[in-house]
Image (cartoon, helix red, strand yellow):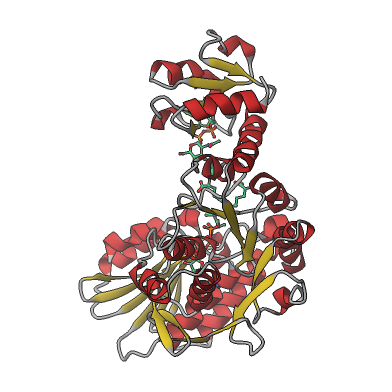
């Protein structure tokens, strides 16, 4: 069956889904193959539980032609369907990629644009070769603007995602030391993320550009750019204000105050404001949207636990975002004790030990009351400071936290996703 025929069936369904543990009544199930399971094994179950169709790539699973669609490769069929659907819909697509701040920028942009348009944005960070197609397939005739987050940990991935989503607009948040395992070094990161700008330029589409970023400035003279930043030649000129607790930006003598901690998030706010201005969202509505947005999922959040103030940034970590979070915490003006709790930064590749040592050196130059480090990489670092304490495992750190009484402390928690450091909160 070809993509156009599958699309006709897709339009009759309630939408695409890939997991029978979250069944979509009347939906179309794509039987993907993963690390743990062969989705084909669940195709029958999908139909029995109420799916309208199941797309499989092993004929023996297609027991009833009324419900089963056989293709050569289910993942490719899903991606082709998403690209077809994107062309079928008459809408605008904005793609957002970058090393840090993709989800925050995407959420803020969605908040802003939804004040004027019917928008659909990536759910959470379903931003890969499966997540991007699912995002596109969640859009319909009503959707006016789709905001699609794109993630990558190896070359050509963003190029492929752009080929599927065919964005009209795009923005790269930044080029940081994330996923160095796949990209090798910062030049690799720049090359891989720039695949989005390459795609936009090839198709004469518009780039939203951070004019303060020297790498992005290389695209400044491209005809279709809409730039923002503190640089005087920016189309939309901001000053980045706020304090170390909450990021905010100022444009046209107006403060856009957020509930997001970390001054590095000011750029993410500015990008969302810039896109709001470009798409002519009323000024006050842009301001309201920024002020209404509350971060979730342990990204740049400030929470209270008893008398303690927690800077919860445990969603993920890499050398760039770790450095930014520590600097921000260091600058926080308070007379109360500051405790730093850090977990390993993963997927950093061969420079992992060096990058962890750089973070320890940064801690040594600051005057935090105590720093707790956990993970294999941090355990291999060197320090003479008695206030920097290493723990072999998250469990051991948790035991220590349970035995320690914190009162009126400011506590920063950051580490890679695998360590799930948000679980430490119950011990504080
Ligand atoms: C393939 C899939 O979707 N897997 C999800 C599944 O995993 P599970 O271990 O259960 O099974 P398999 O993958 O082996 O299963 C194969 C299929 O069988 C289905 N199935 C299984 C059991 C069952 O009873 N019924 C079934 O139907 C199953 O659903 C599969 O379709 O479930 C997990 C738990 O919900 C999911 O976590 C898992 O999802 C995978 C990871 C996935 O890729 N999901 C995408 C929708 C997605 O976008 N995920 C994002 C990824 C965000 C991210 O990390 N981004 C990076 C860059 C990414 C680079 C890219 N190269 C990459 O590696 O992904 C970034 O830096 O931003 C997310 O999880 O948030
Ligand atoms: N501009 C930035 N510079 C440095 N760090 C940042 C920046 N923006 C966000 N971060 C950090 O990155 C963390 C994750 O934010 P966010 O989820 O928005 O990024 P992401 O790029 O979507 O990551 P992922 O792809 O893993 O979801 C935040 O908690 C914050 O610490
Ligand atoms: C969560 C995933 N997108 C990611 O960024 N992983 C890095 C390695 C992390 O967990 O910090």
Q: Nearer the viewer, residue 138 or 370?
A: 138
Q: Where the C terminus falls, by quadrant?
A: bottom left
Residue 397 in the image, given as x and y percentages of width and height:
38, 63
Q: Nearer the viewer, residue 321 or 62?
A: 62
Left or right side of 427 for 299: right
Tell me the residue at 76%/71% (across/down).
223
Left or right side of 404 for 127: right
User: Can residue 141 be seen from the camera position used here?
Assistant: yes
Residue 50 in the image, given as x and y percentages of width and height:
39, 20
Q: Where the N terminus falls, by quadrant?
A: top right
Tell me the residue at 62%/81% (across/down).
235
User: Can residue 386 be seen from the camera position used here?
Assistant: no
Residue 426 in the image, given as x and y percentages of width and height:
27, 60
Residue 293 in the image, given as x and y percentages of width and height:
37, 67
Residue farthest along the left direction in this orientation? 306
Tell me the residue at 41%/60% (across/down).
421
Give residue 387's quadrant in the image: bottom left
Q: Nearer the viewer, residue 395 or 136?
A: 136
Q: Nearer the viewer, residue 34 or 283?
A: 283
Give residue 175's quadrant in the image: bottom right
Left or right side of 415 for 79: right
Label tally? 0
Tell me the residue at 67%/32% (across/down).
76
Give residue 61's quadrant in the image: top right
């Amino acid at each position: 069956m070809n993509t156009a025929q599958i699309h006709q069936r897709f339009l009759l369904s309630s939408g695409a889904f890939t997991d029978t543990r979250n069944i979509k009544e009347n939906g179309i199930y794509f039987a993907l193959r993963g690390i743990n399971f062969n989705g084909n094994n669940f195709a029958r179950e999908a139909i029995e539980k109420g799916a309208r169709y199941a797309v499989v790539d092993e004929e023996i699973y297609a027991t009833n032609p009324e419900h089963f669609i056989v293709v050569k490769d289910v993942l490719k069929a899903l991606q082709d369907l998403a690209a077809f659907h994107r062309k079928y819909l008459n809408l605008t697509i904005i793609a957002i990629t970058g090393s840090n701040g993709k989800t925050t920028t995407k959420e803020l942009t969605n908040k802003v644009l939804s004040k004027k348009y019917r928008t659909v944005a990536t759910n959470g960070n379903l931003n890969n070769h499966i997540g991007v197609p699912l995002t596109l397939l969640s859009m319909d005739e009503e959707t006016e603007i789709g905001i699609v987050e794109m993630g990558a940990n190896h070359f050509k991935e963003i190029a492929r995602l752009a080929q599927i989503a065919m964005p009209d607009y795009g923005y790269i948040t930044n080029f940081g030391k994330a996923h160095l395992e796949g990209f090798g070094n910062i030049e690799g990161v720049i090359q891989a993320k720039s695949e989005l700008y390459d795609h936009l330029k090839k198709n004469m589409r518009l780039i939203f550009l951070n004019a303060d970023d020297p790498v992005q400035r290389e695209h400044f003279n491209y005809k279709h750019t809409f730039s923002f930043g503190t640089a005087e030649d920016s189309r939309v000129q901001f000053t980045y204000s706020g304090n170390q607790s909450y990021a905010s930006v100022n444009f046209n003598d107006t403060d856009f105050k957020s509930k997001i901690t970390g001054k590095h998030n000011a750029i993410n706010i500015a990008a969302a404001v810039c896109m709001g201005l470009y798409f002519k969202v009323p000024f006050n509505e842009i301001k309201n949207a920024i002020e209404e947005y509350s971060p979730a999922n342990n990204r740049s959040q400030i929470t209270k636990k008893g008398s303690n103030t927690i800077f919860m940034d445990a969603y993920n970590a890499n050398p760039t975002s770790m450095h930014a979070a520590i600097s921000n915490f260091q600058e926080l003006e308070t007379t109360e004790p500051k405790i730093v709790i850090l977990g390993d930064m993963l997927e950093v590749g061969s420079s992992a030990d060096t990058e962890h040592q750089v973070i320890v050196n940064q801690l040594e130059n600051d005057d935090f009351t105590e720093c707790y480090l956990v993970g294999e990489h941090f355990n291999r670092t060197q320090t003479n400071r008695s206030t920097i304490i290493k723990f072999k495992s998250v469990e051991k750190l948790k035991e220590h936290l349970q035995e320690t009484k914190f009162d009126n402390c400011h506590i920063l928690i950051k580490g890679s996703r695998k360590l799930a450091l948000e679980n430490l909160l119950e011990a504080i």
